[in-house]
Image: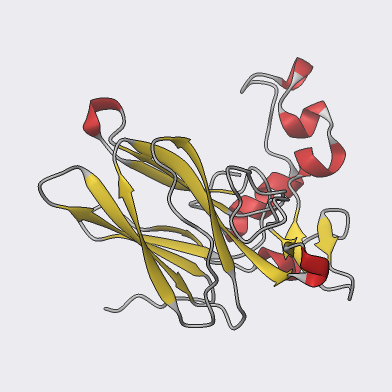
Amino acid sequence: MGIKILPSLALALCYVCGVHSAVITLKNNCPFEIWPAALTGKGAAPPTGFDLSPGASTTVNVPAPWSGRFWARFGCSNSGGRFSCQSGDCGSGQISCNGAGAKPPATLVEYTLGGDGNKDFYDVSLVDGFNIPVFVKPDRSCPTTSCPADINRSCPNELAVRNPSGAIVGCKSACLAFNQSQYCCTGSYGSPATCKPTSYSQMFKRQCPQAYS
C-alpha cells in the first residue's frame, strides 16, 4: 500500500554503504515555495542556501557523526537587499542561515547520525511550535515519523503568528507564548509529577501524535 504524502516538507534518509554517512533528500510537497534550513550541533554543516518550488527536491550529503536539525522557511523575500522569511526565519539576512537557528515557531526534524552505539536517531519536534507539516521516511526498515496535520488551521488565537496580511504562518508552543512555569515545566513544575499535559500540549499531540510537543 502506498504512503499518501500530505502537503509537507518530506525528508528521506538514505544510508551510503562502506562509510557511515547519509544522503538526505528534501522534497517540497507544499503548494508554495519553501527555503529549507539546517542547524548543525556536531559535524560538518550541510549546505542550505537554496529554495524548493512545489514538487521539487534536492539531496544533502551528511557524513557521520552528525547531529542537527532541519526546518522549512516560507514567505521569503529579498526586499531591500536583506533576505527574510515570514515563517522559520533565521535572521542571517541571507538565504543561508550561516549557523543560526530558526526563530520559533518552527517544525523541527532532528537527527543524530552515528550516535551512542553507532546508532542513528531522528524525530519531529514541536517543542518550538509548528509552522509546516513534515514527513520523514528512512530507506531501511526503520519506521517513518511525521507531523502530518496543518496545525495552523486550528491554532488558538493566543498562540498564532500572523503575516502582514493576517494569515497564520506559525503556531507557538504555550511555553513560548506565555513563558510561564506550568507551560515550560520549570520551577515548581520542573518534574514529571508536577508538569502535566495542558490543553495546549494536548492539542499539538492530538494532531501530531508522533511528534515531541
- Percent across and percent down for residue 189 are 74, 21
59 on left or right of 99: left
Residue at 56% x, 78% y is 30
Q: Nearer the viewer, residue 194 or 176?
A: 176
150 over 112 or under it: above or below: below
49 and 169: which one is in front? 49
The extreme front residue here reads 81
Q: Please state if 122 lies on the left or on the right of 194 as rendered.
A: left
Counting from the top left corner in percent of width and height, residue 103 is at 72, 48
Q: Is residue 188 above or below residue 83?
A: above
Comparing 105 with 157, the one in front is 105
Residue at the top extreme, as displayed = 188
Q: Is residue 99 above or below residue 72?
A: above
Question: Residue 109: in sight, yes or no?
Answer: no
Q: Is residue 128 left or right of residue 15?
A: right
Question: Colour scheme in the image?
Answer: secondary structure
Q: Pick the quarter of the image with the N terminus.
A: bottom left
Q: Quadrant of residue 155?
A: bottom right
Picture residue at 22% right of the left edge, 53% below the top = 15
Question: In the figure, residue 212 lies in which quadrant?
Answer: top right
Residue 69 visible in the displayed image: yes
The image shows residue 135, relative to residue 53, as above or below, that is above
Residue 32 is situated, as x and y percent measured from the top left of the image, at 62, 80
Q: What residue do we see at 44% from left, 44% from top? A: 45
**Which quarter of the image is occupied by the C terminus?**
top right
Furthest toward the left, the residue is 18
Number of callouts: 0
Residue 86 position, x and y percent, is 76, 65
